[in-house]
């Protein structure tokens, strides 16, 4: 079966702006990372756009809502997925998109709020 390449609009979540249109041969899930024009973005949401053709709806294009990814060196592997920041800290959110409640912008290294789990 042939891979379908769909037009994908990449939209920065905040401030809301279109970053561009690309053709992807894979379906990025929320939490995945996407490289675009030398920047890395975390996928927050994926929306499908359909068009009615010949009495059937067909996937026409995809919209990805993204945010700028944190430094890729500040990630931890937890339960089969990457999370942002130091997962050994009690305040770590264990999330692909949010570092922690205390210092969400980081960095984790040298953070005065660090407490071991």
Image (cartoon, rainbow, N blue to C red):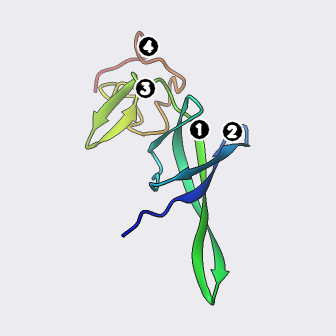
Q: Earlier in the sequence, mark 2 or mark 1?
A: 2
Compare residues 6 and 117 and report the one nearer the observer: 6
Q: Which residue is mark 2?
A: 14
Q: Position of residue 71 (x, y in %)?
A: 47, 23
Q: Which residue is mark 4?
A: 111
- Between circles 4 and 2, the one closer to the viewer is 2
Q: Are marks 4 and 2 in contact (CB under 8 Å)?
A: no
Q: Position of residue 109 (x, y in %)?
A: 40, 13
The residue depicted at 36 percent of the width and 70 percent of the height is 1
- Which image quarter holds the C terminus? top left
Height in image: 99 above or below 108?
below
Compare residues 5 and 17 and report the one nearer the observer: 5
Spatial CA span between label 1 and label 4: 23 Å
What is the secondary structure assignment of the residue under circle 3? loop
Q: Which residue is mark 3?
A: 72
Height in image: 30 above or below 14?
below
The image's mark for residue 67 is 1
Q: Are marks 2 and 1 in contact (CB under 8 Å)?
A: yes
How many marks the image carries: the answer is 4
């Amino acid at each position: 079966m042939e891979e379908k390449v769909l037009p994908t609009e990449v939209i920065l979540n905040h401030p809301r702006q279109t970053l561009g249109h690309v053709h992807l041969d894979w379906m990025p899930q929320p939490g995945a990372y996407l490289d675009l024009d030398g920047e890395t973005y975390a996928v927050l949401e994926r929306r499908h756009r359909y068009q009615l053709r010949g009495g059937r709806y067909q996937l026409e294009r995809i919209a990805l809502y993204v945010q700028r990814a944190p430094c890729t060196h500040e990630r931890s592997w937890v339960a089969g997925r990457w999370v942002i920041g130091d997962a050994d800290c009690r305040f770590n959110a264990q999330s692909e998109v949010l570092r922690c409640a205390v210092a969400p912008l980081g960095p984790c290294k040298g953070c005065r709020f660090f407490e071991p789990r």
